[in-house]
Image (cartoon, helix red, strand yellow):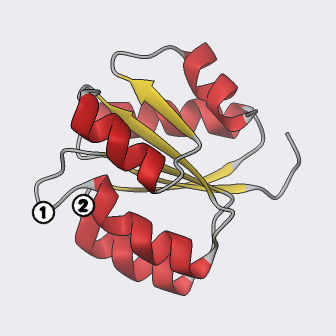
Amino acid sequence: MKEGMTALIVDDEEDIGLMVSVFLKKAGIKTTYLSRVTPAFKRVEEETFDFYFLDLNLPDGTGFDLLPTIRQKDAQAKVIIISAYDGHLETSKAKEFEVTAFVKKPFTKKDILEAIEL
């Protein structure tokens, strides 16, 4: 991985957010972790990231809520959905928003690293 790459992680489960952050930091990626959609909207508007790791089930919305804003700012952004929900509705929406990867919980370090190499 190139130095200087960045990732935004949005997941309400702090242990998962921190675990993804550790995996990415070891790969040389600077991370920002948030646990809610509302502050994530503000961060996405202020800053561009190389990777966006989004949980679907958040207390104040879903990771899908952020996708129009992310895509408007950077149509080529690499978006990785991390969720226990991977049914037809979720995978259809992921395709609609051209999500880079869909990582199902529980996941491994290998799953996260493979998602950023696609």
Name the residue: 26% across, 31% down: 88
Q: Position of residue 53 (x, y in %)?
A: 48, 47
Instruction: Check disc 2 and report the residue beneath it.
Output: 36
Q: If you read the primary sequence from the N terminus, does the residue marked by circle 2 or circle 1 appear first? A: 2
Q: Residue furthest left?
A: 59
Q: Position of residue 26 (x, y in %)?
A: 71, 32
Q: Position of residue 94 (x, y in %)?
A: 41, 45
Name the residue: 58% across, 27% down: 112
Where, quadrant-wise, is the N terminus in this rendering?
top right
Q: Residue furthest right?
A: 2
Q: Position of residue 55 (x, y in %)?
A: 32, 44
| Cα distance between the residues tagged 2 and 1 | 6 Å
Name the residue: 67% across, 39% down: 25
Give the crowd class for mark 2: few <14, some 14-19, many >=20 residues within 10 Å: many
Mark 1 residue element: loop
Figure check: 72 above or below 80: below
Where, quadrant-wise, is the C terminus in this rendering?
top right
Mark 2 residue element: loop
Give the crowd class for mark 1: few <14, some 14-19, many >=20 residues within 10 Å: few
Mark 2: amino acid: Arg
Instruction: Count how many numbered circles sit on residues in the image.
Output: 2
Name the residue: 33% across, 21% down: 105
Marks 2,1: beta carbons within 8 A: yes
- The quarter of the picture where residue 40 lies is bottom left
The residue closer to the viewer here, 33 or 70, is 70
Instruction: Check disc 1 and report the residue beneath it.
Output: 60
The residue closer to the viewer here, 11 or 75, is 75
Q: Is residue 107 left or right of residue 71?
A: left
